[in-house]
Image (spheres, helix red, strand yellow):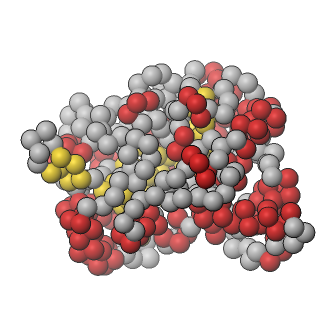
């Protein structure tokens, strides 16, 4: 398991178990269903992280119990291969947990889970048995920094989260990651609050707890723009990179998204797009209690909503309304920030444009071996 395997979404699209859906998109510019659904079961959260990109969306209710269970079945009917339980909110705070996870697993879908880790102990066994990957947002390596970066009313929260990670590591069947968002902010007194100095300390802790990987990544603002790294931050990352490298073994990986390199080498965090439709929206979608959104970057914006959750998901996906709403999202106008799907979009446009001009590039795509990793 390497950076390449975990985060190279473009290569993952070429897996033989994924490729038929890519072919479907290239031939029809639409799909019979998304491969991946990001599902926010609830907007409730027991933390109050100042850097939370979903702060405006929190604690406004969740998907009703019965509807949540129905949706899982409808995703399966629509050909969804993987569900990521995530938020807007802490997914494990939904009172029906772990039933939606178990149901999705029993239907044969792969499960990803992004969590703050504080409630893992409630459903340890089910998560260990049903979830392909769990990523715990910790953003710290000590209780002192944790209390500043991820404040909550939970007593000994850092100890609770790290104990939960350790307990899951002992019995999990899937992959377990420790996530670290690089944060630098000024407190009301003008003092800098940052976690960057403990990047290595957190990575070493992740390894000792039994995680499979440690991921560090840049913070984004409420509008999903990458927050540029200050010179201090850049220097600190560069200083600690060799230490992080030294932690790697065949059982433990240190990964970082391309956005880090982008920020280290570009003065601006903008990423202009020249294409007018977003093919990724045919492969992934975001379902929340307030509606369906095209992608996580548009989550919660009323004017970006592409559908409601009260209609059958399978019918919704195939409807003209959904297809028209999806096609109306114009990345050259509304996605000028760094987007994790950009490279996938470039490839999909290349394939689709070739097909339009009578050049079928699909047979020339060298398919990567089957890894059963549906999380493109
Ligand atoms: S290009 Fe725009 S619409 Fe497409 S995934 Fe990125 S942010 Fe979302």
Q: Is residue 10 left or right of residue 320?
A: left
- Say above or below: 7 vs 325: below
Residue drawn at 22 percent across, 48 percent down: 185
Q: Quadrant of the C terminus?
A: bottom right
Residue drawn at 53 percent across, 37 percent down: 299
Extreme residue toward the right, this view: 358
Q: Is residue 307 left or right of residue 101?
A: right
- Say above or below: 117 vs 65: below
Q: Is residue 237 left or right of residue 331?
A: left
Hey, which quadrant is residue 266 in on the image? bottom left
Residue drawn at 70 percent across, 41 percent down: 328
In the rendered image, residue 189, in percent from the top left (x then y), is placed at 9, 41
Hey, which quadrant is residue 239 in on the image? bottom left
Q: Taking the image as drawn, is residue 213 in sight?
A: no
Hey, which quadrant is residue 353 in on the image? bottom right
245 or 236: nearer the viewer:
236
């Amino acid at each position: 398991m390497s950076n390449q395997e975990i985060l190279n979404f473009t290569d993952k699209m070429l897996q033989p178990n994924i490729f038929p859906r890519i072919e479907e998109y290239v031939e029809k510019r639409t799909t019979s269903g998304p491969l991946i659904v990001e599902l926010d079961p609830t907007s409730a959260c027991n933390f109050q992280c100042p850097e939370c990109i979903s702060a405006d969306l929190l604690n406004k209710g969740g998907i009703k119990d019965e509807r949540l269970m129905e949706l899982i079945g409808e995703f399966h009917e629509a050909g969804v291969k993987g569900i990521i339980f995530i938020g807007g909110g802490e997914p494990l705070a939904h009172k029906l947990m772990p039933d939606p996870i178990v149901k999705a697993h029993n239907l044969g879908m792969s499960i990803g889970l992004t969590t703050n880790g504080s409630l893992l102990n409630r459903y340890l066994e089910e998560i260990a048995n049903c979830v392909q990957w769990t990523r715990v947002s910790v953003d710290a390596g000590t209780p002192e920094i944790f209390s500043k970066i991820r404040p909550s009313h939970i007593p000994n929260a850092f100890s609770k989260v790290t104990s939960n990670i350790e307990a899951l590591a002992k019995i999990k069947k899937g992959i377990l990651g420790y996530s670290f968002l690089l944060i630098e902010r000024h407190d009301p007194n003008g003092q800098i609050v940052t976690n960057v100095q403990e990047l290595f300390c957190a990575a070493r802790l992740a390894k000792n707890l039994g995680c499979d990987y440690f991921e560090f990544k840049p913070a984004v603002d409420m509008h999903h723009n990458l927050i540029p790294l200050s010179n201090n931050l850049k220097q600190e990352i560069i200083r600690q990179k060799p230490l992080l490298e030294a932690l790697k073994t065949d059982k433990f990986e240190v990964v970082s998204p391309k956005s880090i390199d982008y920020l280290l080498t570009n003065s601006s965090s903008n990423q202009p797009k020249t294409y007018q439709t977003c093919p990724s929206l045919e492969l992934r979608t975001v379902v929340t209690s307030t509606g369906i959104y095209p992608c996580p970057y548009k989550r919660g914006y009323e004017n970006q909503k592409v559908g409601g959750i009260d209609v059958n998901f399978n019918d919704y996906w195939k409807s003209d309304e959904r297809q028209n709403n999806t096609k109306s999202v114009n990345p050259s106008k509304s996605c000028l920030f760094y987007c994790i799907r950009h490279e996938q979009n470039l490839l999909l446009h290349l394939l689709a444009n070739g097909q339009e001009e009578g050049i079928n590039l699909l047979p020339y795509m060298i398919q990567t071996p089957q890894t059963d990793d549906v999380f493109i």
